[in-house]
Image (cartoon, rainbow, N blue to C red):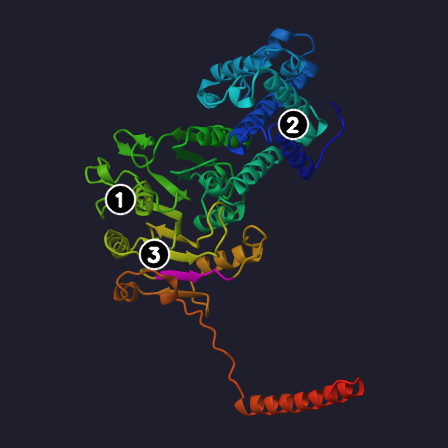
Amino acid sequence: MSNKIKPTQDQINAALWNACDTFRGAVDSSEYKNYILVFMFIKYLSDVWKDHYNALKEQYGDDEELIQRKLKRERFVLPDKCSFDYIYEHRNDTDIGEKIDKIFAQIEESNLEKLDGVFRNISFNSDKLGQTKDRNRRLKNLINDFAKPELDFRPSLWEGKQDILGEAYMYLLEKFASGAGKKGGEFFTPKEVSGLLAKLVSPKEGDRIFDPTCGSGSLLIKVAEETKDAKGNTTNNFAIYGQESNGDTWALSKMNCFLHTMDSAQIEWCDTINNPKLKEGDALMKFDIVVANPPFSLDKWGHENAEADRYKRFLRGVPPKSKGDYAFILHMIETTLPTGKVGVIVPHGVLFRGSAEQKIRQKLIEENLLEAVIGLPTNLFYGTGIPAAILIFNKAKTTEDILFMDASKEFDDGKKQNVLRTQDINKIVTTYKDFKTIEKYSSVVKPAEVAENDFNLNIPRYVDTFEEEEPVDIAEVQQNIEKLEAELVEVRSEMKKHLKELGYE
């Protein structure tokens, strides 16, 4: 590999996406996405390790014992014969799949604190990749693709810009999500929506940030990156936590955090509602900021256990059996500190459905927890075109009023999906921070008015976006009709004259 070529972010992204050709047509994208992302991860570990080894070698010469001692203090350990270069040297071996599996097992074993279980659900020696001959051919192609200069991830080449790798990983996740149909929304929140939510909850230095349905970690990482110190500067002084029920997606989120150098992220694998893993003693752990894009209206979310919930999350009411939206919202509120804030993406039904959900809304408003209801454009999310809204709950509200915002009409009309533009995001964030009424866009509403509407939060009840049609000048219209009719008579007369000249009577 060249020591001089420094590809652009677009070239890296394109090279990664092209590497997927190895599997296209033979393996379903929901399967091969894990192989590509895991292979990108091993290449990253290997290149970082090699880079640091070379730097130490330059500094300490042939004192291998000292170099190895220094390497043990790195963020992670790469055991001997576990590098990408070793894999590349053995790319023609008939047992290459087995060799790769053993390498991943050794890497995991050597980094249990940070990478325990990350590779447990993937095997490069699996029949999913075809029978032995086909599998070996595909793996050789994959190895050759990752040996290209565009995929040289050595930090010295990038002058320490770790975000390039993180961006590339996010790029792949988004590409896979956009092509995954309904399942795409289960593991990735579009970056514009994540960015908007991050600015709305605005984490501060030292905050603990939590996503109880973290998927691949994209939203959680975006919110963490928005953390600012007292002077408004970006800071790494935060702690992030997540939980994810899908094992494959949980592994992706662990690798995603690692690639973003958020090594201390605590991401748990289990169902958040039925088996919350983040606890302090017997109680749920509390956080400053809690965000989520939970599955919309999840059926069988655990209604049968809610009445007897040991954490008493459903004292405001038990959500309906077939719609778990408020189960996630109540979990988020119960895991938020008294000074904390919740930002959650929900389908519009959450705003107006009756019965148990109406009673829960009433209690949340009477406790003065709901701060803002923001309607988003349709077709923003992967796998669903239904309109969604953001709810902001603030346990330290300084007013009893609630801000309603209709931001559904301002977006970029994309071919497959609509996209929030920078100006759309800025307008939403500014309006939220200013907490003000803007004609046909936002409205600051007293809780009494919401109570008069039976705690229905449907945005058109509070934000009037009706556009009156311009008045019609009847006399002018009549005049135009008479003029057109006269022109028509004249045209018909001309046509008759020409037809007669041609011999048609």
Tell me where residue 332 appears, x and y as whole percent: 34, 43
The residue to which callout 1 is attached is 321
Residue appearing at x 68%, y 89% in the figure: 487
Q: Is residue 283 left or right of residue 167?
A: left
Mark identifier at residue 351: 3
Badge 2 element: loop
Stretch of the chain drawn in magenta:
402-409
Q: Identify the residue at image location x=41%, y=70%.
A: 464
| Whole-number angstrom distance, CA of label 3 to CA of label 2 | 46 Å
The residue lying toward the viewer, choosing from 215 and 385, is 385
Query: From the viewer's perspective, is the residue at label 3 or at label 1 nearer?
Result: 1
Alpha carbon distance from label 3 to label 1? 17 Å
Q: Determine whether 16 is above or below 81 in the image.
A: below
- Residue 403 on the magenta span: yes
Which residue is disc 2 drawn over?
Answer: 153
Identify which residue, 31 or 49, lies in the foreground.
Answer: 31
